[in-house]
Structures are given as C-alpha cells and as structure tokens.
Image: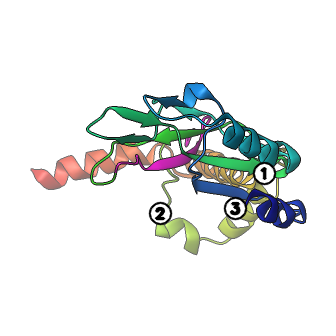
Amino acid sequence: MWSSLENFVGKLDAAWVICGDFNEVRDQSKRQNCVFLDRRAKWFNEFINKTHLIEVPLCGKRFTRICDNTFKFSKLDGFLIFEKFNHVWGDLSVFALERKISDHSPIILRDKDINFGPKPIKIFDKWIKLEGTSKIIEDAWKLNVEGRRLDSIFRIKLKNVKNVLKEWSQNSWGCLDFEIENLKADAAK
C-alpha cells in the first residue's frame, strides 16, 4: 500500500496535507499495551522520508486511540504535510479533542500563532456615503504589506484600513463613541 501511495505523492508539486487514521505508528513510544511491529513502523517511516512529508506534532495528548476499556493506547491519527505547505503555513500543531462515541479522538490542525487581534472594524453607513471615503479605504488597502501567508497579509490589510478609518473619523467628527453613549443616556431618561 505504501509504495502505490508513495508513487502518487511523489508526483505532487503542491502544498498538500494528508490526514487521518494511518493504522501505523512511527515508533514504540506511540503505543502502550499494544503490539508493536517494528517492520511496519519502518515501512511507514520510509514512506514519510521518501515523500518528504513532515509529521505535525500532537499537542495536549500522547494518544489518539483508546480501546479495550481504556487499556490500549495508540497514536494512529495525525497530519502529514508537504514541505511546501510547511513553508506557507509555518508553525502548526495537531490538537486532539475529547472522545465521545468513537475510540478515536477527533483531531484538528491549527496554527500555533493565531492572533485575531482586537475587535473588528466599526464602520458607520454614513461614512460609506461620504465623498472620498472609498478613496481613503482603497489607499489604505493598497499599502505594501510583507508576509508569506495570505491570511496574515489579509489581516494586516484589514488592520491598515481600520487604523486609517479610525484616524479619519477622529479628525472629522471627534470621539463618536462618547457622543453615542451620551445620546443613549439622553434617550433612556
């Protein structure tokens, strides 16, 4: 099985991810109270090495499968990524969720450095209708942004727009948040 998959994977020139239950482990430390077959682990490791895949580390738990009334433990589930994917996404980890029905824990691939920053942009309909607003937004969007990952570049571009709109709003109308709170207090009387 590994050789046919190896031929297929070897022809890919893309940022691919392979995930699932591999039914194999890479070394004895990935099994507890289970039969470990050195030959099968060797084949699995050879496949990973020949195809230049990288195993994404599992965080939080040591094992993803528990069976026989919580006596046997294995780390069978995981993500293997291509080097090209690793260059684009960088610092990734696998997180195992709590088991509910299956003897396998669901796993998710996540970015270790996720930071969505402060709350999203607050924009008023009035601003969109004003002449020149779209030009301000376009200019902020076109600012040069450095980065490898598209999601990071997108986030920085949104932050640029937010900062420009915030400054423009304060220069044009002062502190609208303060004014809005005063109007709400007056309306509540």
Considering depth in this image, is 28 or 86 the residue closer to the camera?
28
Regarding residue 151, the answer to whether it shows in the image is yes
Q: Residue 43, located in which quarter of the rendered image?
A: top right
Q: Which residue is mark 3?
A: 137
Q: Which residue is mark 2?
A: 124
In-image side of 176 versus 98 (left or right): right
Considering depth in this image, is 108 or 149 the residue closer to the camera?
108
Q: Which residue is mark 1?
A: 85
Q: Amino acid at mark 1?
A: Phe
Q: Amino acid at mark 2?
A: Phe
Q: Amino acid at mark 3?
A: Ile
Q: Main secondary structure of the magenta part?
A: loop
| Disc 1/disc 2 C-alpha distance (Å) | 39 Å
Q: For numbered disc 1, what is the local secondary structure?
A: helix
Magenta region, residue range: 103-118
| Disc 3/disc 1 C-alpha distance (Å) | 32 Å
Q: Position of residue 67 (x, y in %)?
A: 34, 42
Q: For numbered disc 3, what is the local secondary structure?
A: helix
Q: Residue at x 57, y 70 (%)?
A: 128
User: Which of the two labelled residues, at mark 3 and mark 2, occupies the earlier sequence position?
Assistant: 2
